Amino acid sequence: MRTAPVIDHRAALAALDAIRDAVKARGKTAAIAIVDAHGELVAFVRLDGVQLSSGPLSINKAYTAARLNRPSRVLGETVRAKGTDVAFYGDPRYAGFGGGMPVRIDGVVAGGVGVSGLSDEEDEALAALGAALLQGDPPGTANA
């Protein structure tokens, strides 16, 4: 019988807290989402002052990373390179912006982390921090 790794709520909340602390240390604000392997929400916070649209976008970035097993930015790059639209992929929840990172445990996708509200590069770096923590990797060594 095959088993799949999961992100439990305690680990999700710990990763969310670490990302939140990193956002606050930058003097900024963001929305942060952590999803399971199916892209369903496990933990979420929208920090004070972030644009309302950042909430659903952070969830969609995490969803995209988990469902496609790659950073959400890669979908956007692929779409632009092919001259198509994200709608071509048939799922309205897919987001092609930077800031969504898959979480892999023992090489298997366990979920995704999405951050929205800063630049794509900052969102992605913060999502990578959360993914690394959930994967048990030392900070700065996330495989993405």
Image: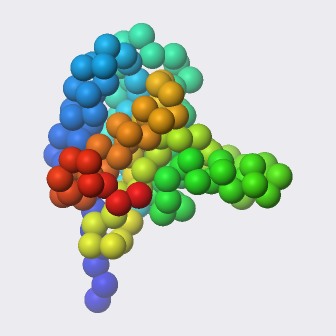
Residue at (31%, 24%) from the top-left corner? Answer: 23
Quadrant location of the C terminus in the rendered image: bottom left
Residue at (42%, 10%) from the top-left corner? Answer: 49
Q: Is residue 91 visible?
A: no
Height in image: 59 above or below 119? below
Left or right relative to 93: residue 65:
left
Percent x, y of residue 11:
19, 48
For the residue pair 45 and 84, the one nearer the viewer reads as 84
Residue at (44%, 34%) from the top-left corner? Answer: 123
For the residue pair 92 and 138, the one nearer the viewer reads as 138
Quadrant location of the N terminus in the rendered image: bottom left
Height in image: 117 above or below 102? above
Left or right relative to 132: residue 28:
right
For the residue pair 42 and 101, the one nearer the viewer reads as 101
Q: How many marks?
A: 0
Residue at (59%, 40%) from the top-left corner? Answer: 97
Q: Is residue 122 visible?
A: yes
Left or right relative to 109: residue 95:
right
Percent x, y of residue 114:
43, 41
Height in image: 3 above or below 89? below
Left or right relative to 122: residue 85:
right
Percent x, y of residue 55:
48, 28
Q: Residue pushed farthest bottom?
A: 1
Percent x, y of residue 74:
58, 54
Q: Residue pushed farthest right?
A: 83
Find residue 44 and report its image quarter. top left
Color style of the picture: rainbow
